[in-house]
Image (cartoon, grey):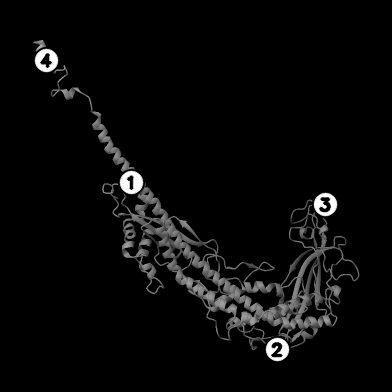
């Protein structure tokens, strides 16, 4: 019985036959089920990783495309502002050049006559060491830049000035001025027209260029489509008038708001009143016309170019030409004179004769003042010089003044002054120099080399000897001549006919649209770039669908156009920067602003607008519109940021 039982359990080979309970007892092949399950999970995880990486890559690409679109659109807008500012500045400079060249051509011939006659008559004036400076006496007490070495000539040398005037005359004769300066067809006036046209072309083309380049940049950065908001970023500018060139030319300021010279300057947005950084001899800010004429009309040393009357005549004629250019009426001294007449040869150089002449319109003087001392002889006055004697070296601090016209009506700058009688007193043979010397005392005066060992910088000294030092304040006036009634009619060949304004004007900011407010900065100086591509990924896309209701991956960025200092249309310093999305005003909702911009249409009259409208269609704007409809400030703050 036992053997029979064993036979039923074993087969012919003695192997165990598998009954229903055989699988339960055997463990062979059980791991295959686990492996298969984990293979499916690993495969899904692999696709998930691939899709996630791909979506992250797409996100980075789209963010880069949005940044590029915003920066590119703003950059072209910025270029438009800079080009217009460049045209405005260059036009101001060219008109200044026309006037000054015109004046030089006019005044050089009479100046040649005067200086040649003066030298021929033997009335030369030698340059003398009027107020020499010995730097070895300065020691360590002299401030850097406060002292000068060499010679200060109170009056010039006629022979030397004659050479300079003849050099001017050679230039005037060598240049064919009408080819360059004529109002009709002259090169400089044609260049002004070209710059004016260029500026207006940039005003029109800038919105188109901003949007077109933004779209192209987005595509180059792998976006299906991208663009910049606002859709048509028009510059907030207006055309000025021809007279708006006056203040930039003369004062280096923006044109006045209400048309009067003394009104607040504008439109300067949140910046400085001076927009052109020209600095003269005395540090004042001025425009190119004032700056370029200054070396001739305010010559240093005192007296240079005055013996020939070149500096005085140049000042008068250049001012008249400026008045003629802008149709400014004649000065208040004699308003009945026509604007196109000026005194050239009808001129009185002797003060005594000029003072009693009722035909004199203006006296012209030049002045200079300085402080000085004689270290070796405190009681010695520095002026007048001793004839035939050597003058001791002095310390001095010059305060030169500009050439200034004085009316003969109740104004006599010679009161209290001594009239020089010979060249050693600072007079030329016509004896037209007056001087005044005032003795002063001081405990401390570093500019004069007067210091004490233990004295405070200012106030009573602590030195026991209580020493006061003497120094002298010297003031000198020189009479440059008297302008009499006009005797010469100035031509208008290089200027517009009287009453005929040129068809030229600077482009200026619109004060309403470009005022320095949060709203205007957001509307006219802020750009939002958007870029998108299909949100679906390439790996197993049917199983990994974008849960966002917008089936596109949309990214956005914001850029701003700005200037570091004065926001105006005469400064070529506009820049672009990427900024955090949002307005200058924290209460501004950027999503509402972008939605408003997106719903705006491109102006129907915009030149070449079809270049944008044919591409920027409604279906291509739709993904951005869906994003803006789903987003708001609260959602972005709480969820995405």
> Given contact means CB atoms under 8 Å apart, are the residues at marks 2 and 1 in contact?
no
Asked if the residue at tag 2 contacts the one at tag 3, i.e. Cβ–Cβ closer than 8 Å, the answer is no
Separation (CA) of disc 3 from disc 4: 141 Å
Point out the tag, 3 or 4, that comes first from the N-terminus: 4
Residue under label 3 = 464
Task: Classify mark 1: residues with Cα within 10 Å, few (<14), some (14-19) or many (20+).
Answer: some
Calculate the distance from the C-alpha at mark 4 to the C-alpha at mark 1. 62 Å
Q: Determine the CA span between mark 4 and mark 2.
A: 153 Å
Q: Which residue is mark 1?
A: 51
Image location (x, y in percent) of residue 96: 62, 76
Residue that carries the numbered disc 4 in the rendered image = 7
Secondary structure of the residue carrying tag 3 is loop
How many numbered circles does the render carry? 4
Which residue is found at the position 31% from the left and 49% from the top? 538
For marks 2 and 1 on the same chain, the one whose residue lies earlier in the sequence: 1
Q: Earlier in the sequence, mark 3 or mark 2?
A: 3
Separation of disc 1 and disc 3 at Cα? 91 Å
| For discs 3 and 2, the disc positioned in front in the rendered view | 2
Upstream in sequence: badge 1 or badge 3: 1
Q: Which residue is at the front of the view, 349 or 497? A: 497
Please indicate whether residue 290 sits to the left or right of residue 535 in the image: right
Element class at badge 1: helix
- CA neighbours of label 2 inside 10 A, class few (<14), some (14 to 19), many (20+): few
- Say above or below: 425 vs 78: below
Marks 4 and 1 in Cβ contact (< 8 Å): no
Label 2 near label 4: C-beta < 8 Å? no
Judge whether residue 613 can be spotted in this image: yes
Counting residues from the start of the chain, the first of labels 4 and 2 encountered is: 4
Few, some or many C-alpha atoms within 10 Å of disc 3 (few <14, some 14-19, many ≥20)? few
């Amino acid at each position: 019985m036992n053997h029979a039982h064993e036979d039923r359990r074993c087969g012919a080979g003695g192997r165990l036959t598998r009954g229903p309970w055989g699988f339960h007892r055997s463990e062979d092949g059980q791991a295959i089920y686990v492996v298969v399950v984990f293979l499916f999970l690993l495969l899904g995880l692999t696709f998930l990783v691939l899709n996630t990486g791909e979506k992250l890559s797409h996100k980075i690409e789209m963010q880069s495309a949005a940044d590029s679109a915003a920066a590119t659109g703003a950059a072209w807008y910025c270029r438009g502002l800079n080009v217009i500012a460049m045209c405005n500045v260059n036009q101001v400079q060219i008109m200044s050049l026309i006037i000054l060249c015109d004046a030089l051509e006019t005044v050089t011939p009479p100046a040649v006559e005067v200086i040649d006659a003066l030298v021929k008559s033997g009335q030369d004036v030698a340059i003398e060491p009027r107020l020499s400076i010995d730097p070895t006496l300065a020691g360590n007490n002299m401030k850097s830049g406060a002292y000068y070495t060499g010679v200060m000539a109170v009056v010039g040398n006629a022979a030397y000035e004659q050479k300079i005037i003849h050099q001017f005359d050679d230039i005037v004769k060598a240049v064919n001025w009408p080819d360059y300066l004529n109002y009709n067809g002259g090169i400089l006036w044609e260049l002004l027209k070209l710059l004016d046209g260029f500026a207006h072309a940039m005003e029109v083309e800038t919105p188109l260029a901003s949007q077109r380049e933004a779209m192209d940049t987005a595509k180059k950065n792998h976006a299906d489509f991208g663009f910049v908001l606002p859709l048509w970023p028009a510059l907030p500018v207006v055309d000025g008038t021809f007279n708006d060139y006056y203040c930039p030319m003369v004062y280096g300021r923006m044109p006045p708001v209400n048309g009067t010279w003394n009104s607040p300057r504008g439109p300067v947005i949140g910046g400085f009143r001076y927009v052109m950084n020209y600095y003269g001899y005395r540090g004042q800010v001025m425009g190119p016309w004032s700056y370029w004429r200054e070396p001739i009309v305010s010559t240093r040393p005192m007296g240079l170019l005055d013996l020939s009357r070149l500096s005085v005549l140049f000042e008068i004629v250049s001012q008249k030409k400026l008045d003629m250019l802008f149709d400014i009426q004649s000065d208040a001294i004699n308003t009945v004179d026509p604007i196109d007449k000026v005194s050239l040869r009808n001129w009185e150089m002797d003060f005594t004769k000029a003072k009693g002449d009722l035909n004199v319109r203006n006296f012209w003087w030049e002045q200079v003042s300085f402080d000085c001392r004689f270290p070796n002889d405190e009681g010695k006055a520095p002026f007048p010089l001793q004839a035939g004697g050597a003058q001791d070296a002095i310390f001095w601090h010059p305060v030169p003044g500009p050439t200034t016209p004085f009316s003969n009506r109740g104004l006599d700058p010679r009161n209290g002054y001594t009239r020089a009688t010979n060249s050693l007193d600072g007079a030329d043979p016509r004896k037209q120099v007056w001087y005044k010397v005032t003795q002063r005392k001081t405990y401390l005066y570093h500019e004069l080399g007067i210091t004490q060992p233990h004295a405070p910088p200012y106030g009573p000294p602590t030195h026991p000897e209580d020493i006061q030092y003497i120094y002298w304040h010297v003031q000198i006036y020189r009479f440059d001549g008297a302008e009499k009634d006009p005797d010469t009619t100035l031509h208008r060949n290089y200027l517009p006919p009287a009453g005929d304004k040129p068809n030229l004007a600077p482009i200026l900011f619109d004060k309403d649209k470009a005022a320095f407010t949060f709203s205007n900065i957001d509307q006219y100086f802020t750009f939002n770039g958007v870029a998108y591509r299909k949100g679906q990924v390439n790996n197993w896309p049917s199983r990994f669908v974008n849960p966002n209701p917008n089936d596109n991956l949309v990214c956005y960025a914001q850029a701003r156009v700005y200037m570091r200092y004065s926001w105006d249309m005469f400064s070529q310093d506009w820049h672009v920067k990427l900024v955090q999305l949002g307005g200058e005003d924290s209460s501004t909702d950027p999503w509402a602003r972008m939605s408003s911009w997106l719903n705006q249409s491109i102006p129907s009259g915009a030149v070449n607008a079809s270049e944008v409208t044919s591409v920027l269609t409604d279906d291509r704007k739709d993904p951005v519109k869906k994003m803006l409809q789903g987003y708001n400030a609260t959602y972005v703050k709480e969820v995405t940021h």
